[in-house]
Image (cartoon, rainbow, N blue to C red):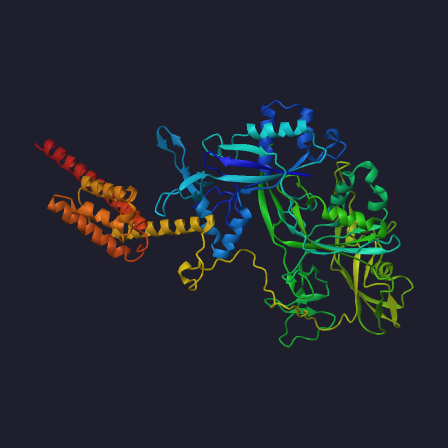
C-alpha cells in the first residue's frame, strides 16, 4: 500500500454534522471523538471527492476503477470493485500529541470541544420578519486554530492560523500515475464540505501530499519460530487495536455484531493473497477452502489484555447483583433469589469484558436518505486465533505483519482500520493431551458459533455433542444449554447473499460425564461446517460444576484497573506546584490553548460580576465610558522599553496614569469608582498578568457602555412619549 495524506484547511467555519443534537441547546452537532476533538468522517470526504470527480467530467470507467462500485466484487469495475484507495477520518494535525496532552492535563472532553467549536444561530425570514419556531442552533468547528504562534513577548497577541485536518490515504499498489493524478485533481477541486456548505459553512482548501508516509510499526509483543515444519500445525494468536470504528453486518439490518467474525478475517487475508504477484501466490483454494487454515473470530479483550469469550450458558446472575452463579453447582439461595441467564456477556479468566458500541449517522445524498449504522467503537483491543498448517503458517504471519489491516464493511472509507499490536506463533505440541477423569462433571463450551453438518433434518443435541467429542469417547451425555441463530452473510464477488444456515450460538454448552479415565488430543477442538471462517471452535472444560470464581491476575506490576469508557477529567495540574529545582518546561500548544481558554472564561465571569455591582445611577455617560475603554486598549497595545518592563504591573500603571490625566473632576471621580469596583471583584486573579486584568477591564467597560446606551435610549423614548402626550393635550 502507498501511504499518503490529504490536508484539509478550513477557510470558513465547518459543520461536519453527526446527526445528533442536545435538546434545546444545539439542534445540529459536529462529529467529535471521546476526547472532544472534532474530526471529519471519511465517508463524507469520499462522497465529496466523487462529486468533485463528476464536476471534472472524469470518465465513468476511470471513476469506477478509482472510487469503486458499492456492493460490487473484484470482477466488476475493471477488476477493482472496492476502488483503488482507502480513507481514514480526517483529524487535526498532531492528533496523537494533542491526545497525550489532554490525558496528561486531565482536560474534560467538553472543555476540549469548546476550544475548537462555537455555536451559531439561524432562523427563517418571511416578509422581513423571523418566522415562528424556526430558530436553530448549530455547533461549528471554528475556522481558526486555537493553537497559536507567539510573535513577541509573553503579553503579545497570538497569531492564529487556519485549522488544518489530516486525512490518511492508502492507495492500492496497482494504482497508476494517471489515477493518482485524477485523485489529486479531485482534491484540488474539492472546495466545500459538510452541512450548509452552500450557505457560508464548510469552505476548505484540499491538497494531496504525495510524499510517502513513514511506516508506523506498532508491533512490540512478537514471538515467532525460526522456521516452519510443513508436517506440523501452528497456532497463531494476535491482537489488534481498532484505530477506527468497525462495522460488521448483522443480517442486513444496519446493526453490527459485537465481534469480528472469522469470515471477515478470511476476506482480509484473501485480499492480501490476491494482491501478491501471481508467481508468489500460494494455492488459493488450498489456503482458504481446504480447512488447512482456520481463521478464528476476533473477540474483545478485558482490562488485562486477556481474550474474552461469550459467557457459557450454564452461568447465570442474580437480579441487581454482579455475582455470577454456576447452575451446575447451584444450591438453593438462602435469600430465595432466582438466577437469570447471563445474556450477551463476555468473560475472560480474570473478569468481565464489555464491547463498546456506537451509532453513526449517514446520508445517502443521491437517494436523499438519512440512515444510521451501529458499529464497534474505535480504541478497543480485540484478540484472535488462527490455526494453520506449517506450509501456510509463514504466509499468514507475513500477511499479518505487512500492509494495512482493515476489517468489516465500508473499510475503504471511515471504518475498519486496525493496528497489529501483538503476534505469537508456536507449533501445536504433538504430545499435548487433555485428561478427563471418570465421574467428574465436564462441559463442552462453544467459543464460536457452530454449524452442524446434517443432511435433511437437524441433528439432536446428543448427535451434535458426539460429533464434537467423538463417537468412541467413553462419556455419558447429560444435558445441554443451547441457543440457536441463523448464520448468514454476503459474498462480494458474487454480489449475492449467502444461503442461510441454522447454527448453535457461541456460549452454548454440552454437559457430560466420562465413564472412564481418558485423554483428548487437546482442550480446543473444531467441529461442524465453515471452520475456515471462524465457526466450530469448542473448548472442553473439566470439573465444570465447581463454584464460579475469576482467577487473580498475577503480574510484577500492580493490578491493572478497569479500562475507562472515556478519558477521566481530573483537575488541571497546577504548574506552580512543581517541586523546586524542576527545570522550566515550554508549554505544549494544547496546554497553552487550554490555559488561554480558561483565562478567557475567567475574564468573562469576573467582568460580568463586576458590571452587575454597578448601579445605573453610578454610570458615566456613554462617551466617558468609551474614552476609558480606549485608554485600556491603548495601554494593552503599547510597546514598552526594556527599562519600563522592569517595573511591576507596568501596563496597569500606564492605564492608571491615563485615567489620572482626565481633567473633569466628575468624570475622573466616576472612572476611579469603576476601577475600584473592578479591582474589588478581580482581587488577585490576575496579579501575574496585567494583560488579563486589562482585557477584563475592557470587557467590563463594554458591558457598562451597552447598559449606558440602553439607559439613554429608554430615557429618550420616555421623553418622546411625554412630548407626544403634551402635544395631544387640549
Q: Is residue 391 left or right of residue 315?
A: right
Find residue 329 and report its horizontal and vertical position in percent: 73, 73
Viewer-nearest residue: 460 or 542:
542
Q: Quadrant of the C terminus?
A: top left
The structure residue drawn at horizontal position 61% and vertical position 27%, both measured from the top left corner, is 53
Q: Residue 215 lies in what quarter of the image?
A: top right
Find residue 249 and report its horizontal and vertical position in percent: 69, 45
The structure residue drawn at horizontal position 18% and vertical position 50%, both measured from the top left corner, is 672
Q: Residue furthest left?
A: 730
Q: Is residue 479 left or right of residue 92?
A: right
Badge count: 0
Q: Is residue 371 above or below residue 577?
A: above
Find residue 119 and report its horizontal and vertical position in percent: 42, 42
Viewer-nearest residue: 646 or 183:
646
The structure residue drawn at horizontal position 26% and vertical position 41%, both measured from the top left corner, is 634
Viewer-nearest residue: 175 or 623:
175
Q: Quadrant of the N terminus?
A: top right
Residue 204 seen in the current view: yes
Viewer-nearest residue: 86 or 654:
654
Q: Is residue 149 left or right of residue 707?
A: right
Residue 369 seen in the current view: no
Q: Residue furthest front?
A: 643
Q: Residue furthest bottom?
A: 334
Find residue 327 and report its horizontal and vertical position in percent: 72, 69
Q: Is residue 226 above or below residue 213?
A: below
Q: Residue furthest right?
A: 472
Amino acid at each position: 500500500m502507498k501511504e499518503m495524506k490529504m490536508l484539509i484547511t478550513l477557510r470558513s467555519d465547518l459543520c461536519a454534522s453527526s446527526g445528533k443534537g442536545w435538546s434545546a441547546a444545539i439542534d445540529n452537532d459536529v462529529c467529535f471523538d471521546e476526547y472532544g476533538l472534532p474530526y471529519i468522517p471519511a465517508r463524507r470526504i469520499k462522497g465529496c471527492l466523487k462529486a468533485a470527480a463528476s464536476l471534472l467530467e472524469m470518465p465513468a470507467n476511470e471513476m469506477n476503477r478509482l472510487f469503486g462500485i458499492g456492493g460490487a466484487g473484484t470482477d466488476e469495475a475493471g477488476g477493482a470493485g472496492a476502488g483503488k484507495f482507502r480513507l481514514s477520518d480526517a483529524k487535526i494535525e498532531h492528533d496523537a500529541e494533542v491526545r497525550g496532552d489532554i490525558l496528561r492535563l486531565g482536560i474534560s472532553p467538553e472543555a476540549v470541544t469548546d476550544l475548537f467549536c462555537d455555536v451559531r444561530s439561524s432562523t427563517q425570514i418571511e416578509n422581513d420578519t423571523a418566522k415562528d419556531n424556526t430558530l436553530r442552533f448549530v455547533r461549528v468547528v471554528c475556522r481558526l486554530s486555537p493553537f497559536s504562534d507567539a510573535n513577541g513577548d509573553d503579553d503579545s497577541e497570538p497569531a492564529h492560523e487556519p485549522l488544518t485536518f489530516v486525512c490518511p490515504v492508502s492507495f492500492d499498489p496497482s494504482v497508476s500515475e494517471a489515477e493518482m493524478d485524477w485523485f489529486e485533481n479531485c482534491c484540488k477541486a474539492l472546495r466545500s464540505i459538510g452541512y450548509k456548505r452552500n450557505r457560508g459553512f464548510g469552505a476548505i482548501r484540499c491538497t494531496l501530499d504525495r510524499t510517502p508516509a513513514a511506516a508506523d510499526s506498532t508491533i512490540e509483543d512478537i514471538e515467532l519460530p525460526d522456521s516452519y515444519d510443513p508436517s506440523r500445525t501452528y497456532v497463531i494468536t494476535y491482537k489488534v487495536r481498532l484505530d477506527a470504528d468497525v462495522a460488521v453486518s448483522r443480517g442486513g439490518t444496519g446493526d453490527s455484531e459485537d465481534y469480528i467474525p472469522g469470515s471477515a478475517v478470511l476476506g482480509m487475508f484473501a485480499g492480501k493473497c490476491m494482491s501478491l504477484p501471481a508467481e508468489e501466490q500460494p494455492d488459493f483454494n488450498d489456503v482458504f477452502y481446504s480447512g488447512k487454515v482456520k481463521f478464528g473470530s476476533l473477540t474483545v479483550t478485558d482490562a488485562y489484555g486477556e481474550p474474552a469469550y461469550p459467557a457459557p450458558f450454564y452461568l447465570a446472575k442474580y437480579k441487581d447483583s454482579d455475582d455470577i452463579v454456576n447452575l451446575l453447582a447451584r444450591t438453593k439461595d438462602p435469600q430465595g433469589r432466582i438466577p437469570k441467564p447471563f445474556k450477551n456477556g463476555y468473560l475472560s479468566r480474570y473478569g468481565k469484558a464489555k464491547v463498546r458500541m456506537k451509532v453513526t449517522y449517514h446520508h445517502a445524498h443521491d437517494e436523499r436518505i438519512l440512515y444510521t449504522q451501529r458499529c464497534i467503537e474505535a480504541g478497543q483491543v480485540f484478540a484472535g486465533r488462527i490455526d494453520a498448517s506449517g506450509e501456510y503458517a509463514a504466509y499468514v504471519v507475513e500477511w499479518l505483519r505487512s500492509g494495512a489491516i482493515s476489517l468489516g464493511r465500508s473499510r475503504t472509507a471511515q471504518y475498519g482500520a486496525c493496528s497489529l499490536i501483538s503476534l505469537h506463533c508456536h507449533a501445536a505440541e504433538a504430545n499435548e493431551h487433555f485428561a478427563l477423569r471418570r465421574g467428574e462433571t465436564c462441559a463442552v463450551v462453544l467459543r464460536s458459533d457452530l454449524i452442524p453438518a446434517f443432511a435433511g433434518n437437524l441433528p439432536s443435541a446428543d448427535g451434535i455433542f458426539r460429533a464434537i467429542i467423538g463417537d468412541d469417547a467413553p462419556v455419558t451425555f447429560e444435558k445441554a444449554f443451547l441457543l440457536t441463530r441463523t448464520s448468514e452473510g454476503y459474498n462480494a464477488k458474487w454480489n449475492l447473499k449467502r444461503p442461510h444456515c441454522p447454527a448453535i450460538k457461541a456460549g452454548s454448552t454440552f454437559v457430560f460425564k466420562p465413564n472412564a479415565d481418558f485423554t483428548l488430543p487437546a482442550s480446543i477442538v473444531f467441529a461442524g461446517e465453515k471452520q475456515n471462517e471462524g465457526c466450530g471452535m469448542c473448548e472442553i472444560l473439566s470439573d465444570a460444576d465447581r463454584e464460579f470464581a475469576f482467577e487473580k491476575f498475577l503480574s510484577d506490576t500492580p493490578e491493572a484497573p478497569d479500562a475507562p469508557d472515556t478519558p477521566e477529567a481530573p483537575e488541571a495540574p497546577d504548574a506552580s506546584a512543581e517541586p523546586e529545582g524542576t527545570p522550566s518546561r515550554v508549554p505544549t500548544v494544547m496546554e497553552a490553548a487550554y490555559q488561554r481558554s480558561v483565562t478567557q472564561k475567567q475574564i468573562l465571569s469576573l467582568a460580568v460580576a463586576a458590571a452587575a455591582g454597578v448601579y445605573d445611577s453610578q454610570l458615566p455617560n456613554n462617551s466617558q465610558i468609551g474614552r476609558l475603554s480606549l485608554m485600556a486598549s491603548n495601554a494593552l497595545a503599547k510597546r514598552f522599553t526594556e527599562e519600563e518592563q522592569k517595573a511591576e504591573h507596568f501596563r496597569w500603571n500606564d492605564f492608571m496614569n491615563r485615567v489620572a490625566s482626565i481633567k473633569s473632576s466628575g468624570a475622573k471621580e466616576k472612572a476611579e469608582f469603576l476601577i475600584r469596583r473592578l479591582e474589588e471583584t478581580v482581587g488577585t486573579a490576575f496579579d501575574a498578568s496585567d494583560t488579563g486584568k486589562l482585557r477584563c477591564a475592557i470587557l467590563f467597560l463594554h458591558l457598562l457602555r451597552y447598559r449606558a446606551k440602553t439607559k439613554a435610549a429608554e430615557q429618550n423614548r420616555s421623553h418622546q412619549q411625554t412630548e407626544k402626550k403634551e402635544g395631544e393635550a387640549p
